[in-house]
Image: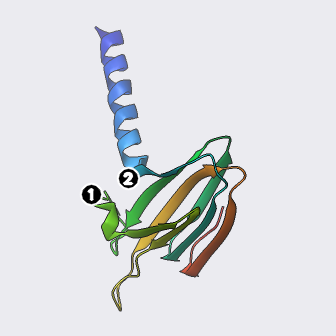
Amino acid sequence: MKYFRICFLTCVFLFCANVLVAQPQTTFDIHDSSAPVSIEAEVYWGNLTVVGDAVESVRLTIAHTSLNGAPVRVQNWKEYVAVDQVENMIRVRGRRPDEGTFESVDLTLHIPARAGLHLRIEKGGEIQ
């Protein structure tokens, strides 16, 4: 019985730790082609992370943090980013917060290794 309690409490602890650490996010494919692609990504305040790999699609993951510092699940990604595609040029722009408010829109792009990149952060954040 003691062993069962220890295992149960360990599982509960690991589950709670995972929930607290995991940031709500939304992930989706925005492009799928074997042709070379160029990508422009821009956020007003937030982080841009780019992962190049031997893939043919471009996958975008969005995370949003509001003024109180709590991550918010992105229900409708179109409220937080604009994605435009003209031929093989993909432009991803995080939204600008309302005047006097803070929000962070973090974008992670998984892209083909051969893709061209232009990345920009206007106010603050990191590019990785």
User: Could you tell me how far apart the alpha carbons at marks 2 and 1 are, in whole angstroms?
Assistant: 8 Å
Residue projecting furthest to the bottom: 99
Image quarter (top left, top right, bottom left or bottom right) of the N terminus? top left
Q: Is residue 3 shown above or below 26? A: above
Q: Secondary structure at mark 2?
A: strand
Q: Is residue 76 left or right of residue 110?
A: left
Q: Position of residue 15 (x, y in %)?
A: 35, 34
Residue projecting furthest to the right: 114
Give 115 or 119, whichever is nearer the viewer: 115
Give 35 or 39, whichever is nearer the viewer: 35
Q: Is residue 27 shown above or below 101? A: above
Image quarter (top left, top right, bottom left or bottom right) of the C terminus? bottom right
Circle 1 residue:
75
Query: What residue is drawn where x is 66% and y is 71%?
Result: 118
Q: Position of residue 125 (x, y in %)?
A: 57, 73
Q: Position of residue 53 (x, y in %)?
A: 67, 44
Q: Secondary structure at mark 1?
A: loop
Query: What residue is drawn where x is 34% and y is 61%?
Result: 77
Cβ atoms at labels 2 and 1 below 8 Å apart: yes
Query: What residue is drawn where x is 43% and y is 48%?
Result: 21
Q: Position of residue 25 (x, y in %)?
A: 39, 53
Q: Amino acid at mark 1?
A: Gln
Q: Amino acid at mark 2?
A: Thr
Disc 1 residue crowd, few under 14, some 14–19, many 20+, Cα 10 Å = few
